[in-house]
Image (tube, helix red, strand yellow):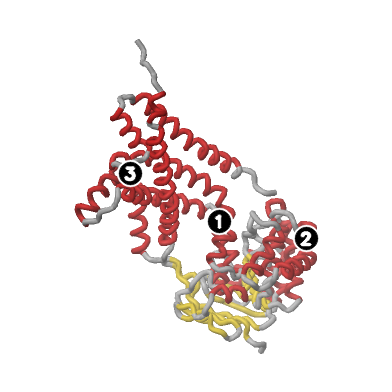
Amino acid sequence: MKPRQLEASGVVKVFGERRVLDDLNLTVGEGEVVAIIGPSGAGKTTLLRCLNLLEIPEAGVIRLRGQTLYQDGRIIAKRLPDVRKRIGMVFQHLHLWPHKTVLGNIIEAPTVTGKLSRAEATERARALLAEVRLLDKTGSYPASLSGGEQQRVAICRTLIMEPEVILLDEITSALDPELVGDVLEVIAGVAERGHTMVVVTHEIVFARDVADRILFLDRGQFVEEGPPERILTEPRHPRTREFLARVLYSKQMRAHL
Amino acid sequence: MGYHWDFAIVFRFAPALLHGTVLTLELTAITIVFGTLLGALVEVLRRVPSRLASFVVALYIEVFRALPLLVLLVWLYYLLPLAWGIRISSFLTAAIAMTVNLSAFAAVTIRSGLEAVPRGQNEAALALGMNPSQVLFRIVLPQTARVLLPNLLGLYITMLKLSSLASVIAVYELLHSANTVISQVYRPLEIYTVIALIYLILVLPMSYLSKRLESRVQPRPA
């Protein structure tokens, strides 16, 4: 088995009366890409937010490369910002900073946190922008970009920090359909380079193509997991079957798998 | 028939009125600096995850926004020496009352300014490893300054005007110096006309600045 890059065990997160994450366990190996699918309200986004401690769980353990970050209600890691530098996250709703240019958005975090000098950061940012085919937008403000372009900038903003794990939270679901392809293509490229990734997505076909493993999350727990082909074509758990039947509503879509 | 205006009298008392103007500006300036700082502190306290802290902050804001400044002023004026034996100048008493009053309004203004920036932008910055103060100074404040500054300036203008209330506890600010002059030479119309003009001269540039800042809120960089 590959070394464990990210490990969550027994994670419980409660909002009011609801146990959004209910004794949840997840292990992601080094260089592994896992896709998390599941109905809305299953706890997918909450799980990602707990993994980088934007949300503090009520119980459980979270480890990054063997280092305990969080245990049973207490943050163990000394400096939360240093931990978050190592766990990148791209959000559904883009969240670029509108008062900064594309370049400004990308070099902000590495320069402010002292990771890179301004010159190094600019050089890295330009290389990343070239990869996502946005080099001509370096000086533009986010408001003048399409949603897909903004999301590609957000991906660069995360990649420049060279995180050990990348969390992607339904990064295409706020985009117009015709913009989705470019973003997924970029992510597929990132995955190929051996990054460890946790991908929450509604794009089943994309999950199949990019993930080493698919996990089906429902009511705060992983109900089923396995290789993409197997999960998507022969789901074993009734709730997985029901979910896939609703998502892949047409015969043609199933035929694609 | 008709009032015989005699503005020459004003010039005789120009030094007293000038002194009053300077004191009005001092009182307002002190209030603005400390009231804003205290207001920011109140907003920081509000974010402390404790029910007691948020209750105290909410009470503070509600009470001092509801209490008329004039009442607070005379109350402190008698309370400090009589109840606690604290003897301080009426200038300082006025500065304290105005600072507390402004801080309650400033806290609310600062809160709404900070909340104008979507939470997701803060979280994106936190997720990249920036610490909370970096997020505040690099991401939130630069965006909200264009909303925040005109609103704060509006509060400052109000404080400048309200500083005239300090005259009731014998602070030698502009209105009080005018009243003293009037008690010596019975010329209320001339004197009050002149101090009205002085207030206008002090306030109008601030109003103009506030309008300028507000109009810059509209266009966004594109």
Q: Position of residue B34 (x, y in %)?
A: 42, 54
The image's mark for residue A134 is 2
Q: In the displayed structure, does residue A170 sit left or right of residue A47?
A: right
Binning the other alpha carbons within 10 Å of mark 2 as few (below 14), some (14 to 19) or many (20 upward) gives some
Above or below A242: residue A176: above
**Residue pictured at 58% horizontal, 86% vertical:** A66
Q: Hey, what amino acid is under mark 2? A: Leu
The image's mark for residue B73 is none
**Residue pictured at 46% horizontal, 49% vertical:** B109
**Residue pictured at 75% horizontal, 59% vertical:** A138
Q: Where is residue A225 in the image (x, y as percent from the top left)?
A: 62, 78
Q: In the displayed structure, does residue B193 sit left or right of residue A113?
A: left
Q: Which is nearer the N-term, disc 1 or disc 3?
A: 3
The image's mark for residue B69 is 3
Q: In the displayed structure, does residue A175 sit left or right of residue B61?
A: right
- Marks 1 and 3, how far apart in space? 30 Å
Pointer 2 indicates a residue of which chain? A
Q: What element carries label 1?
A: helix
Quickly name the residue at label 1: B141
Q: Quadrant of residue A100?
A: bottom right
Q: Hey, what amino acid is under mark 1? A: Leu
- The quadrant the C terminus of chain A occupies is bottom right
- Marks 3 and 2, how far apart in space? 57 Å
Q: Where is residue A18 in the image (x, y as percent from the top left)?
A: 45, 67
Disc number lying in front (1 or 2): 1
Q: Which residue lies furthest to the front in this view?
A: B12
